Amino acid sequence: MTTVTAAAPNLLTRVSFGIGGAAEGVKNNGFEYVLLFFYSNILGVDAGLVAMALLIALVVDAFSDPIVGYWSDNMRTRLGRRHPFMYGALIPIAVTYYFTWNPPAGMTGNDLFLWLVALTILVRLSFTFFDVPGTALAAELTQEYDARTSLLSLRTFFGWFGGLTIQILLFRFLLVPTEEIEIGVFNVDGWNTYGLVASVCIFICALICTVGTHNHIPHLKAPPAARKITLATVFKEIFETVSNPSFRALFLATLCGLIASGISATLNQYINTIFWGFTNAQIAAITAAVYISAILALIIAPIVGKTFGKKRGAIVIGALAFTIAPMPVFLRLLGLLPPNGSEALFNIIFFITIFDLALIIATQMLMASMVADIVEDSELQTGRRSEGIFFAGISFIRKLSQGVGVMTASAVLWVSGFSTGGGGAGASEESIRALGFGYGVSVLAAWTLMLICVSFYKISRESHGENLRLLRERDAAAAASDAP
């Protein structure tokens, strides 16, 4: 294979690539946080059927990821390997996402089950065709160690920014009460408008990413030589590629990290309202402060990566972040924090949350960049560029592990006595303490396992530079042998 050195991406290209993450943030926010509520509580579909529909779509999507990744690694067109998929996905993503939130008017209740199954599968498949090749561009736009951190930090930042913005837009401006509807979340027109606004946002962000990286197509890595590929070859090469030890380390680390995220996301409302006793206004302030955390992370991750290296930096700031996260809960259990309802308590949690979440996001940024550096390490071993497979593998484990954290959180709620509903009304002091203890221990355990897995990652700044040198020498030797 001929190695082509990609032109260094300028600021416009880096921002365009990063904005592609906003499309993912908007889609994920809808699918992971409110789709179940919309179909079960608003449209009247049995919650078990909704969960089954989402699970079916998730499994189909997860297994499609490595196939699309492999396909985009081997695609041969005038538009290169990645962009045909990205351009082709633009309209299907927007159209299917819109209709997910705007089902046929005459269809209600459990009659919507097959519609939900079909639309969620189509949305996820369409997005796979954009996101897997699009994210894989990170390893092709630049081979420079620190530049990759900057590139994927922007992608992660815009993912958080997009998800948070669409969430605030939905609950603050679209789900508003009317004369006929006293509670805003039951405003179906608001949900329908959300589907339109979100689909337009996804389309625009995906289009900016695709067009903004288009001019780099001539400089991206060339596809492998044409060859006969059988189904057995596909799965053999996928397995060979993902057997890379550094990839296995990140694969398992991502699994553990997502379990922690699932626990935190599921229990967060319980912790804020029942354990801390915060008001809606205070919770809204903490939610909006995520913008500050994302901006801080965008500054922190490149600096830490350049100073300590990606692996060590991820372990250092990850250990700091994951120690700080449950610390206020443990301090409260020991009676060392101000009482609920006090301004001092809110200020402490508010500023700790901003700083801690910034470190967590920065850790995610560094780990995303570590995936890109596996590409050259694998190329030396296999002779193939497999950006698509590696990023698809991380996407795969994200999707299949989403429910594990939720299940763990559900177990914490069951043990604490909060599994039968009723919120915090009449909750005993013992139950509240059990909730805090279960939350703190479970997230700390999951994050600790994540950092242990990261420690098995083998690629450093020096070894990455050596990999690039060996690849240049190999390509030079191949070119010399081909010369007449």
Image (tube, grey):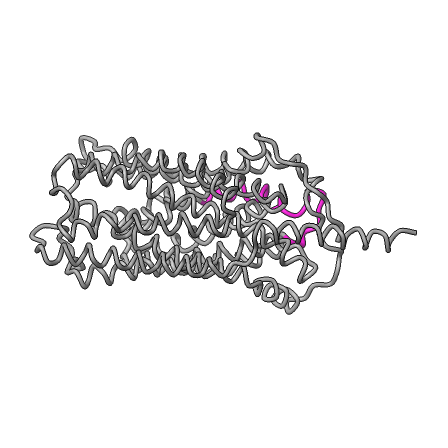
Residue at image position (70%, 43%) is: 5
User: Is the residue 275 above or below the residue 278 in the image?
Assistant: below
| x and y percentages locating residue 434 in the rendered image | 16, 59
| x and y percentages locating residue 386 in the rendered image | 62, 55
Question: In this orientation, does residue 400 appear?
Answer: yes
Whether residue 88 appears in magenta in the rendering, the answer is yes
- Residue 327 in the figure: left or right of residue 82: left
User: Is the residue 389 above or below the residue 243 in the image?
Assistant: above
- Residue 38 in the figure: left or right of residue 226: left
User: Is the residue 475 above or below the residue 238 in the image?
Assistant: above
- Residue 81 in the figure: left or right of residue 34: right
Q: Main secondary structure of the magenta part?
A: helix
Q: Name the residue nearer the viewer: 327 or 92.
A: 327
Residue at image position (25%, 48%) is: 268
User: Is the residue 426 above or below the residue 212 in the image?
Assistant: below
Whether residue 414 appears in magenta in the rendering, the answer is no
Specify the quadrant of the image occupied by residue 225. Answer: bottom right
| x and y percentages locating residue 23 in the rendered image | 46, 40
| x and y percentages locating residue 87 in the rendered image | 59, 41
Q: Which residues are magenta?
A: 73-96
Specify the quadrant of the image occupied by residue 227. Answer: bottom right
